[in-house]
């Protein structure tokens, strides 16, 4: 493990140990928050019992669908916009201010249009993740060496072949960064939408436990979401580093 990784691990361990001590010695009451060790124990019990299996599968399926739509749409739109300078100059200021838009304000409309199923949650996650993927694609395409593009023209490669063989492979590290952001935003969008109005999913279960003062369910499920998103991002981060290493960076 690299030194930076050891430092991160030490910081997290110190924070958890401090929180454990505050909970154990009564500085933080058990009614407010159980100790981290208790949360881990309760999470293991929930996973072993399988009582939340349906909610976990539902949320992960919605997140996966939101990420998939975000990645495909973001890459396709990024490649298209990158080829049209006028279109990019028109839309780029909108991308910069996109996240100032309260996306959750569209949730009532989505419920009216699509009902209380998974579609509104997936759309919220997609709307948050797609722009991150699009802007990362544009950043990656901007850094493709022009000599490679001239080589593609010399070999008379079409737009699709050029994208498949040259531009997208060169932009791959930036695309992975976009996927990392899309995963994070998809989790935020889907779980947040389940909080607002849903009949199932991890967000719904956390909100239900909160309203019933059930810390034995609420905190373990929050920890589960943190662990899932952290593991996915760590895997993507390792992939990103390997891509950068191949390019000598």
Image: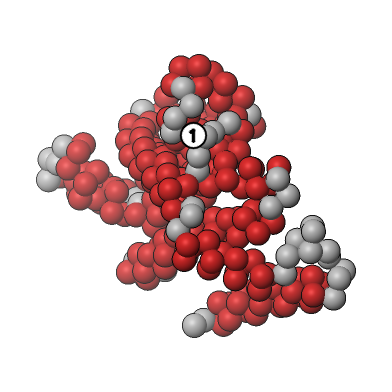
Describe residue 199's horizontal placement relative to residue 150 as left or right: right
Instruction: Decide: is 80 above or below 90.
Output: below
Q: Position of residue 119 (x, y in %)?
A: 42, 30
Please say if 174 is above or below 198: below
Q: Please name whichever residue, 47 or 174, is drawn nearer the observer in this view of the structure.
A: 47
Q: Which residue is more in the foreground, 64 or 206?
A: 206
Report the front residue among 97 and 114.
114
Q: Which residue is mark 1?
A: 121
Left or right: where does residue 102 sit relative to residue 48? right
- Percent position of residue 165, x then y: 20, 50
Circle 1 Cα neighbour tier, 10 Å, few/some/many (<14 / 14–19 / ≥20): many
* Residue at (60% x, 69% y) in the render: 40
Expressed as whole percent of the image width and height from the top left, the position of residue 5 reads 55, 77
Question: In the displayed structure, would residue 23 be above or below residue 96?
Answer: below
Q: Position of residue 25 (x, y in %)?
A: 85, 76
- Regarding residue 194, the answer to whether it shows in the image is yes
Q: Tell me where residue 10 sits by quadrant.
A: bottom right
Asked whether residue 177 is in view, the answer is no
Residue positioned 50% across, 16% down in the render? 112
Which residue is located at x 49 percent, y 59 percent? 228
Quarter the C terminus occupies? bottom left
């Amino acid at each position: 493990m690299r030194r930076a990784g050891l430092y991160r691990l030490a910081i997290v361990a110190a924070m958890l140990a401090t929180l454990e001590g505050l909970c154990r010695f009564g500085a933080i009451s058990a009614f407010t928050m159980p100790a981290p060790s208790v949360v881990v124990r309760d999470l293991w019990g929930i996973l072993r019992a399988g009582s939340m299996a349906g909610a976990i599968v539902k949320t992960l399926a919605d997140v996966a669908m939101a990420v998939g739509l975000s990645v495909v749409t973001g890459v396709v739109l990024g490649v298209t916009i990158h080829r049209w300078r006028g279109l990019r100059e028109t839309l780029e200021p909108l991308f910069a201010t996109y996240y100032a838009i309260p996306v959750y304000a569209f949730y009532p409309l989505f419920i009216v249009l699509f009902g209380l199923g998974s579609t509104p949650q997936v759309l919220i996650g997609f709307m948050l993740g797609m722009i991150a993927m699009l802007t990362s694609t544009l950043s990656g395409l901007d850094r493709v060496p022009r000599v490679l593009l001239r080589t593609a023209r010399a070999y008379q490669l079409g737009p699709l072949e050029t994208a498949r063989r040259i531009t997208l492979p060169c932009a791959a590290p930036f695309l992975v960064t976009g996927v990392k952001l899309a995963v994070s935003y998809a989790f935020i969008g889907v779980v947040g939408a389940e909080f607002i109005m849903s009949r199932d999913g991890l967000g719904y279960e956390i909100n239900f436990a909160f309203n019933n003062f059930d810390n034995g369910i609420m905190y373990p499920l929050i920890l589960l979401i943190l662990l899932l998103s952290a593991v996915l991002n760590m895997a993507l981060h390792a992939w990103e580093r390997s891509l950068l290493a191949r390019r000598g960076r």
